[in-house]
Image (spheres, grey):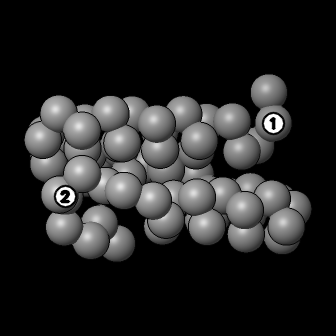
Amino acid sequence: MEDFDTPFAYEGMARAHAVLGNRAEALDHFRLAESGGERIADAEDRKVFFESLRGGDWHGIAKLD
């Protein structure tokens, strides 16, 4: 596994919970994704990850960060 795999998995869980309207769970997974993203060693990989995390449709969940 790469150092970005787990943060992207947490992002996926956060988005899934957002789709379902589960705000607390979305926030929990968002924070785990964000924390993991900070540990991505390669600067370009980290940039790509955070662009993904902070972009797109969060299905009515208020700004998460």
Residue 27 visible here: yes
- Please name the residue that numbered disc 1 is placed on: 2
Task: Residue at 61% x, 36% y: name it.
Answer: 6
Question: In the figure, is residue 18 to the left or right of 13?
Answer: left
**Residue neighbourhood size for the residue with mark 1, other residues' Cα within 10 Å, grouped as few (<14), some (14–19), many (≥20):** few
In the picture, the quarter occupied by the C terminus is bottom left
Relative to 26, is 31 above or below?
A: below
Residues at marks 2 and 1 touching, judged by CB atoms closer than 8 Å: no
Q: Residue 55: horizontal and vertical position, in percent?
A: 49, 65
Task: Residue at 73% x, 69% y: name it.
Answer: 47
Residue type highlighted by circle 1? Glu
Quarter-of-image position of residue 57 = bottom left
Relative to 21, is 46 above or below?
A: below
Quarter-of-image position of residue 62 = bottom left
Residue 35 visible here: no
Relative to 20, is 52 above or below?
A: below
**Residue neighbourhood size for the residue with mark 2, other residues' Cα within 10 Å, grouped as few (<14), some (14–19), many (≥20):** some
Describe the element under mark 2 as helix, strand or loop.
Answer: loop
Task: Residue at 45% x, 59% y: name it.
Answer: 56
In three-dimensional space, the C-alpha distance between marks 2 and 1, rounded to whole angstroms, equals: 29 Å
- Please name the residue that numbered disc 2 is placed on: 61
Observer-side mark, 2 or 1, equals 2
